[in-house]
Amino acid sequence: MQRAAVLVRRGSCPRASGPWGRSHSSAAAEASAALKVRSERSPRDRILTLESMNPQVKAVEYAVRGPIVLKAGEIEMELQRGIKKPFTEVIRANIGDAHAMGQQPITFLRQVMALCTYPDLLSSPSFPEDAKKRARRILQACGGNSLGSYSASQGVNCIREDVAAFITRRDGVPADPDNIYLTTGASDGSCFEVACEFPRAFQIDNALISTGAHEEIGPKTTILKLLVSGGGKSRTGVMIPIPQYPLYSAVISELDAVQVNYYLDEENCWALNVEELRRALRQAKDHCDPKVLCIINPGNPTGQVQSRKCIEDVIHFAWEEKLFLLADEVYQDNVYSPDCRFHSFKKVLYQMGQEYSGNVELASFHSTSKGYMGECGYRGGYMEVINLHPEIKGQLVKLLSVRLCPPVSGQAAMDIVVNPPVPGEESFEQFSREKEFVLGNLAKKAKLTEDLFNQVPGIQCNPLQGAMYAFPRILIPAKAVEAAQSHKMAPDMFYCMKLLEETGICVVPGSGFGQREGTHHFRMTILPPVEKLKTVLHKVKDFHLKFLEKYS
Amino acid sequence: MQRAAVLVRRGSCPRASGPWGRSHSSAAAEASAALKVRSERSPRDRILTLESMNPQVKAVEYAVRGPIVLKAGEIEMELQRGIKKPFTEVIRANIGDAHAMGQQPITFLRQVMALCTYPDLLSSPSFPEDAKKRARRILQACGGNSLGSYSASQGVNCIREDVAAFITRRDGVPADPDNIYLTTGASDGSCFEVACEFPRAFQIDNALISTGAHEEIGPKTTILKLLVSGGGKSRTGVMIPIPQYPLYSAVISELDAVQVNYYLDEENCWALNVEELRRALRQAKDHCDPKVLCIINPGNPTGQVQSRKCIEDVIHFAWEEKLFLLADEVYQDNVYSPDCRFHSFKKVLYQMGQEYSGNVELASFHSTSKGYMGECGYRGGYMEVINLHPEIKGQLVKLLSVRLCPPVSGQAAMDIVVNPPVPGEESFEQFSREKEFVLGNLAKKAKLTEDLFNQVPGIQCNPLQGAMYAFPRILIPAKAVEAAQSHKMAPDMFYCMKLLEETGICVVPGSGFGQREGTHHFRMTILPPVEKLKTVLHKVKDFHLKFLEKYS
């Protein structure tokens, strides 16, 4: 075979079509015949197989397109094919994607983006001057005045200045543009959202489930990557809240760090207790070197908004125990409870005085994906990192400098978020109206959801103080637990699967986020429009009652 | 200290400002005093230091903002401050960023992007109907008809269909949308471009320089990540061309794979010789398990365009030696030499018959960053991966599914590239004119550059058959080599530094890309406008002659 092929190759082949398989010389015919025989046998072994592939990648266990999401897709296809079901559509209440659920983009934001994209529009009378002003500012800072140019690795300079100015205004404490890094999103993993299902039971305290998130989850991975070191009992420990947004467990596993769980207090609106932080830390020290404390505020999936005192306590704890603080604050605009208010970790840190503000290493994250903007697809975000050792700053810049610059259109979107219309500007009124409409709507839906769920026997729902999810606790009768086990599913996975099959509603089982042993939850977004959300809530209620009855 | 802090925390603090540093209770005063004393000592040790950080990250050696780029930045600042120099501006001929050098975006592309961004414009008479048609097509495929929604992890479905249709038209062989994955760029690392300088001598055959590229370099990393396994002598070997685009060496190092260099033939227009592939493979088998063969066509930095026969030979070699082929084809629109033509690896593979087309595992890459579009900032790209083992397809989807979906605006940009105006459509004429202008201009500059460099004693420049760079070989006299050594620099780094200091022209030393021992090169883009490019070329010539004289 090989010889024939060699003959073919070396033979003169004046045909433009080349020697492979088309020549009519005898050597070629021989080769062709040999090839034909070979291909009539089974197709050749692949180089890349389950056996030969990267074992670390194979080990990555997670329910990407997990059972529920896969099922949702199948059901959608069946509906399309006209197969009759007890419902007419699948409702994707599992994804934190506001626009997909009908939320409208903010007009001003899209106007500035359009002007940046197609600068001819700068001469169009259809666009307000305040939008044009911002577009010009962004464009003049881009190479060739184009969103199509690469930016510097830390991001477009004037956008970093605008972010710093925003933070300064928001907090009343100064922010330095040099500590600002524009990023590709903050923490959101779209398909993460979709994929948040875990076929395995979540193991408490030594949670080993990897969700395999990696590349492109951007800034948090970068910071964690810098921090993680050591082996065996010296492996870096990273403290994360349970329930958590599973990005963290994924990255921690990827980096071969140790996940250190601290439990939020469900009995107390998912509050963070410093005593629980102490407990977790104390136990962790046996088997790792805890160095990092991750906070999500407002929380995902739990929606709690931390009180100022709680934030101070956490900061003091981090200072005392020498922990690098990561503060995920992407839902900072999503605060609904009238008793709650967003306080940034940065602000509180500074107001605690120099010993804290000069020493606590803190990275804070924000993005364009949530809030009132809902611009997930643009992948805009930033992080502010303070009190880095000067030599580490160089290492961070090194790491960031070799990744691709964040998409410039996303950077532009972030700029508009931090530099919105102000009173007196032409677009201010419409902007404010649209923003208040979105947030007011979310607040209404948050309350609606909490109230309705709490009317259902066997469902308990903490107040949705913020963010955009409900994370109700569900009672799953013993018989249902058995049924789940016989299907080799976690009980809440079984529940969610049944919910999907009987109502078309797609939510994420609590086992994906972590929960206290013996408790069960699911996470549902509050993003569908009000009327649809009410329908969803009633359907969940009806399903739940029937489920309880069936398995009692 | 700790006790005082505890006292303060537990004390009742009715003030909204909280206990930290502002309370006037005696315990608090005590705590404050203690804090004050502590902060008057040296600032506290950081958690994250060079000693405590991730050693793998620290080991990442590369010249991010390397000496030349740093120097370029310094010089720009000095010029801004009015310091007199022999030149008035720094010319960044190191970055493959067309828009930054004045190339104009394609009107049609930006029109469709603007319509997608701000759909109100769909009712504006200022936009042609063919642009609106495409915008509507893209938007109806997005969640909530918005670029702000997440897309599926493989990318927006109709865009994948459009990519498959494009490939089918281009090659005359069918492409399956299911094998298409939309990505965040293809191979480009913006800051990579900027950072392509290596202070260390490039070690031949066991090249160990890591450039630390990682996260977000997207598709190639993903494929390589899947492929890499084994330890010691079984570590996966990845064959790459020398000179190479340093992304490869970086990723290979990151993944702990083994870099296997094959040398392009400078005497023969940087051609790829299969005998050299055989040589490299044979030697590599001693110390690794070679599984991957990377091709860049047209080449970067070398600009060679592979002949069809060469491609057939490479494919046969890969088939024979069981190598997974990675074909980086981002410069497929940048072919200037009238004797050259772009042939995709996919097309040639299929035309070689079933034994090849049914078996060779091939991943091909394209992006929006080069060509006639120059849209680097949008980070649009795709890869087509064929002949994957069915179980591996699932693994690839798994890996992609947990990364963030590629920015949807970039996906839209890619769609327009694969679905441009056709004859008969309103925008066709202007589109063709603009495209031909850009490509014609580049072709002219390619020839101009080759001709001028070849007139300079001590500079030899192969024809720039394609891509957008010149990679001339430079004679560096022995005395200059000594001078370089005394400055602890590679000779071509020394040359490029002097060039920058004396002319303001910023290029990248060949040692960054790899070159045969004892040879020296630099890479310069041909992106500046024609007149500026001529000036640049003359300045380089003058500099070179003076350099030769000085160091003879």
Image (tube, coloured by chain):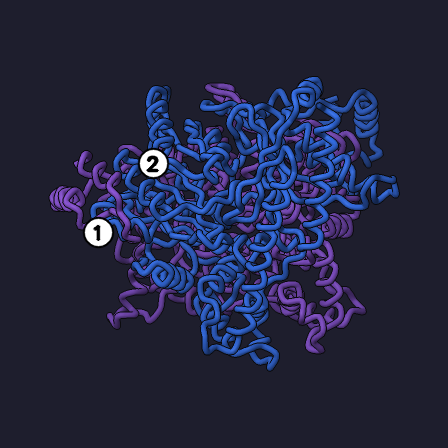
Chain colours: A blue, B purple
Q: Is residue B487 above or below residue B115?
A: above
Where disc 1 sits, the SS reads: loop
For the question of whether residue B499 can be seen, the reply is: no
Spatial CA distance of label 1 from label 2 is 41 Å
Q: Which is nearer the eye, B539 or B246?
A: B246
Q: Position of residue B489 (x, y in %)?
A: 29, 45
- The mark that comes first in sequence, 1 or 2, is 1
Q: Are marks 1 and 2 in contact (CB under 8 Å)?
A: no
Tag 2, which secondary structure? Answer: helix
Residue pictured at 34% horizontal, 20% vertical: A286
Residue type at the position of mark 1: Arg
In the rendered view, would you say A78 is above or below A385?
Answer: above
At label 2, the amino acid type is Lys
The dot on residue B431 is none
Crowding around mark 1 (Cα neighbors within 10 Å: few <14, some 14 to 19, many 20+) is: some
Residue B190 position in % (x across, y down): 47, 52
Is B235 left, or right, of B202 in this rendering? Answer: right
Identify whether A410 is placed above or below B112: above
Which quadrant does the N terminus of chain B fall into?
A: top left
Q: Mark 1 points at which residue?
A: B22
Task: Write down the residue under mark 2.
Answer: B58
Whether labels 1 and 2 share one chain: yes
Q: Which residue is drawn at 60% across and 46% down?
A: A451
Quadrant in which residue A396 is drawn: top left
- Establish if B468 lies above or below B269: below
Q: Which chain carries label 1?
A: B
Q: Which residue is drawn at 43% across and 67% down?
A: A141
